[in-house]
Image (cartoon, rainbow, N blue to C red):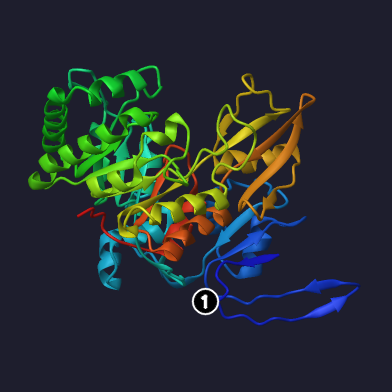
């Protein structure tokens, strides 16, 4: 089965045959397609079917060696339009110059490089792919400082911004630093702008309501915190500030808007933009401590840009469900549009999944975080068939282990493509990924095929 992502853009021939109520469709496409694995498929057979390089197909989908494929697994396929065979004495730079493309674009077209300029004679490089851009957008991603350097390097060519997670602060406005030196250095090598992330997260890995409340009600220390952040940004070469205060409650909403306005007044004249992360609200007066502290209209006016945190419907301690089901994500965007200029908005995209144990027991169940590659390998190992929930626009599968039933929800090329399409539908500024610590090569291929990536610029 072949799934065409955007049929209004694709050329196709439909061969129709009806036999015992069975409809058979054959699509002929040039741009990116998503193949859904059926019984008997292998990387080699699928590569032959589409006339693409099997090694590139495997790398683009995070399939290693002679690994089997799970029935229902998605494989994203792109078609090279122009290729080059490396000759003795050539470098990646010389090849890029001879074709008039950037090294960054060669990294995007060739995941085998993993963001490194190491090539060898006889190696085939893709110079151009047959893409199907939906528009011009900015991208970025969050990452913990312990991210593997090779994984970070492979993703940075696709990210206009990198947010090391996270700087904290104390009640007196002094900062709690992180080891971000390597991340900043790597980002700058790829032309990715590092953005300082500041949150109320404590060493206990929880967002502190007490810290936020005390700080927001003590305006005497606002200047101290903002200037401490400004000093770090100047010293380390950060592009701007990303503020993430969560679980504030209604009592802190007005002060939070006032603080962001205050911070912008100091930072913007110095050349530093400020953005703010917003809980996924669908109405002005939505109940709940997570939502009430975020005044969309006020914060949208106060900040240079906002992130809609449109993920975590399915979460570690919650009932099993899709992480970012498309319907509630869409409702958040549509509400945000009534409060904030669309060109200030970045859509949050989840880059992970969860392995939930069944039955779900409130207060006891705890899901395990899982990547696309881990999910597919788990499906293969357990013999599970991967399904796709058309309503949620997300893949999932069930399996049994040691007599216990599990259900896994995660993101693949289909679900990410559907969410990226929202940027076009609603004229958003771009997308930010939470987070980059989990490998997902399909995501990178989809970004490269669908988005014309702009320089990250919040002014």
| Farthest-out residue, right | 20
Q: Which residue is drawn at 65% across and 35% down?
A: 320
- Residue 428 screen position, x and y as percent: 37, 59
Quarter occupied by the N terminus: bottom right
- Residue 406 screen position, x and y as percent: 71, 32
**Residue at numbered disc 1:** 9
Left/right of residue 68 with respect to residue 221 in the rendered view: right
Q: In this view, does 240 lie above or below 359?
A: below
The one of 347 and 292 positioned closer to us in this rendering: 292
Left/right of residue 355 with respect to residue 15 in the rendered view: left
Q: Residue at x 38, y 29 (%)?
A: 249
The one of 95 and 428 positioned closer to us in this rendering: 428
- Residue 459 screen position, x and y as percent: 19, 55
| Farthest-out residue, left | 269
| Among the 4 quarters of the image, the one containing residue 451 | bottom left
Q: In this view, does 442 lie above or below 400?
A: below
Q: Residue at x 56, y 29 (%)?
A: 316
The answer to whether any part of residue 371 appears in the image is yes
- Residue 388 screen position, x and y as percent: 67, 52
The answer to whether any part of residue 197 appears in the image is no
Left/right of residue 227 with respect to residue 277 in the rendered view: left
Where disc 1 sits, the SS reads loop
The one of 62 and 193 positioned closer to us in this rendering: 193
Q: Residue at x 30, y 54 (%)?
A: 344
Q: In this view, does 458 lie above or below 100?
A: above
């Amino acid at each position: 089965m072949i799934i065409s992502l955007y049929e209004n853009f694709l050329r196709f021939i439909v061969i129709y045959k009806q036999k015992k109520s069975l409809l058979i469709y054959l699509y002929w496409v040039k741009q990116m397609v998503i193949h859904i694995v059926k019984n008997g498929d292998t990387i080699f057979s699928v590569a032959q079917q589409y006339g693409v390089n099997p090694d590139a197909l495997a790398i683009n989908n995070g399939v290693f060696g002679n690994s089997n494929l799970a029935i229902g697994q998605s494989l994203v396929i792109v078609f090279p339009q122009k290729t080059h065979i490396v000759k003795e004495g050539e470098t990646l730079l010389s090849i890029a110059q001879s074709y008039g493309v950037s090294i960054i674009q060669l990294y995007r077209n060739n995941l085998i490089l993993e963001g490194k300029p190491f090539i060898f004679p006889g190696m085939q490089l893709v110079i151009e792919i047959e893409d199907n851009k939906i528009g011009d957008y900015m991208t970025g991603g969050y990452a913990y400082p312990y991210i593997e350097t090779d994984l970070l390097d492979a993703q940075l060519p696709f990210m206009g911004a990198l947010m090391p997670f996270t700087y904290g602060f104390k009640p007196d406005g002094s900062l709690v630093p992180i080891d971000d030196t390597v991340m900043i250095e790597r980002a700058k090598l790829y032309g990715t702008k590092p953005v300082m992330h500041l949150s109320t997260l404590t060493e206990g890995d929880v967002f502190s309501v007490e810290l936020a409340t005390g700080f927001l009600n003590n305006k005497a220390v606002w200047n101290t915190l903002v200037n401490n952040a400004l000093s770090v940004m100047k010293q380390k070469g950060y592009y701007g500030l990303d503020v993430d205060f969560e679980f504030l409650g209604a009592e802190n909403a007005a002060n939070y808007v006032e603080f962001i306005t205050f911070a912008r007044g100091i930072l913007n004249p110095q050349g530093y933009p400020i953005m703010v992360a917003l809980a996924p609200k669908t109405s002005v007066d939505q109940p709940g401590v997570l939502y009430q502290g975020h005044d969309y209209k006020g914060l949208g006016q106060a900040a240079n840009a906002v992130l809609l945190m449109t993920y975590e419907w399915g979460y570690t301690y919650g009932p099993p469900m899709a992480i970012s089901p498309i319907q509630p994500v869409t409702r958040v965007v549509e509400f945000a549009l009534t409060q904030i200029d669309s060109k200030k908005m970045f859509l949050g995209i989840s880059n992970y999944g969860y392995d939930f144990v069944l039955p779900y027991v409130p207060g006891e169940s705890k899901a395990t975080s899982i990547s696309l590659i881990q999910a597919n390998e788990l499906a293969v190992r357990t013999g599970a068939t991967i399904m796709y929930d058309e309503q949620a626009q997300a893949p999932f599968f069930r399996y049994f282990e040691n007599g216990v039933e599990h259900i896994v929800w995660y993101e693949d090329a289909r679900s990410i493509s559907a969410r990226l399409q929202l940027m076009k539908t609603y004229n958003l500024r771009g997308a930010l990924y939470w987070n980059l610590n989990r490998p997902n090569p399909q995501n990178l291929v989809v970004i490269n095929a669908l988005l014309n990536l702009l320089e990250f610029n919040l002014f």
